[in-house]
Image (cartoon, helix red, strand yellow):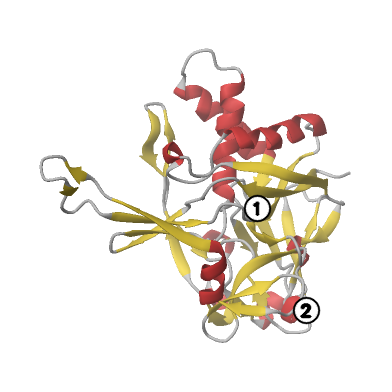
Amino acid sequence: MNKWSGYEVILKALSPIHLGYKKMGVVDLTRRYIPGKNLWGAATAVKATMNMDTYDPNKYLSEGKYIRDNFRFSCFYPYDLQRQSVVIPTYQYNCLEYLYARGNDLFSAYEFESQYISSYASTSINGELGSAREHTLHEIEHLVSGLSFKGYVFYKTSLQDTLVCDLINKLTTQGLGGDRSRGFGRVRVVEINKLPTEGNLFNLSGFGMWKWQFDSKDEELCFHLEMGEKDRVLALLPIVFDKSQNTNFQYMMNFIGDIEPIVGREWSATGAGQKFSEVIYTITPGSVFQLKELALNSSKRLKMNAYGYVNMII
């Protein structure tokens, strides 16, 4: 019996989208994709405000747990409508490039940024002098308006399809990312397509990379790595280092990519952003590695959580 169902979802940005990454001088950089946790946050806000007459922070906590227990959100990558392919970061030749998941076409980070990234600069004004106030210049990098994104929303089969589709469509009422008070982060749903019970995540076929096959029969939503022509795995989702699950570099070799510590602000009983999440360390999407022989003889499964991170099960 199937435990999970899923939808392939295509979004279109109606305004610039800023997804906080890190700071470089006065510039707030953006991620090149929408992390799954941003979708979880938007879904939590939608569910919490459906039946809220007066503001209640505890409602966000309970609905956030409901979404974590019943939904899984992948990253949403820029989607080229003409090629019918997502654009995924990858380290192929010791530097960051971008790959069309369907095919073998690579293009440089510079080309990606020239097409999909822009920025917005602003400063405070000194009213007395009629000039810029010192030390207030800042610039916000963002993904451009009009860009499409594709990703996946998985959910437990005990939920009704109509309820899930309604929740996905109502994501348009919530902004994604930062600076929403300035009009950033508005999206609309372009397509929602039901997934088969098994399939290849993002239809990856380029460069002979291992495919991430999802299986809806697993109690916990997992992806099974299927060997490709080349003995290399491309991280399509952030992979968490978890020593309790024996996930670390002793099972990997020829690693090219980034390791990123992730920490964020979360809801608590005192309101939004009043609690810091526990630090986790992840292999970032786009990183490439090979598995050692010990791992090759294992189940090679990746268990997904609600925020779009996966734990490797060796």
Disc 2 target residue:
228
* Residue at image coords 76%, 29%: 163
**Farthest-out residue, top:** 53
Under circle 2, the secondary element is loop
Q: Looking at the picture, which amino acid does disc 1 mark?
A: Ser
Which one is earlier in the sequence, the residue at label 1 or at label 2? 1
Q: Which mark is residue 74?
A: 1
For discs 1 and 2, the disc positioned in front in the rendered view? 1
Residue 245 percent across, percent down from the top left: 58, 61
Around disc 1, counting alpha carbons within 10 Å, would you say few (fewer than 14), some (14 to 19), or many (20 or more)?
A: many
Considering the image in quadrants, where does the C terminus appear?
A: bottom right
* Residue at image coords 57%, 66%: 285
Q: Is residue 137 left or right of residue 188?
A: left
Residue 219 percent across, percent down from the top left: 76, 47
Residue 287 percent across, percent down from the top left: 57, 73
Q: Is residue 281 visible?
A: no
Residue 235 vertical position relative to residue 163 in the rendered view, above or below: below
Q: Is residue 45 left or right of residue 127?
A: right
Around disc 2, counting alpha carbons within 10 Å, would you say few (fewer than 14), some (14 to 19), or many (20 or more)?
A: some
* Residue at image coords 80%, 44%: 5
Q: How many marks?
A: 2
Under circle 1, the secondary element is loop
Q: CA distance from mark 1 to mark 2?
A: 22 Å
| Residue in the foreground of this view, choosing between 158 and 24 | 24
Q: Which mark is residue 240?
A: none
Considering the image in quadrants, where does the N terminus appear?
A: top right
Residue 87 percent across, percent down from the top left: 65, 67
Q: Looking at the picture, which amino acid does disc 2 mark?
A: Gly
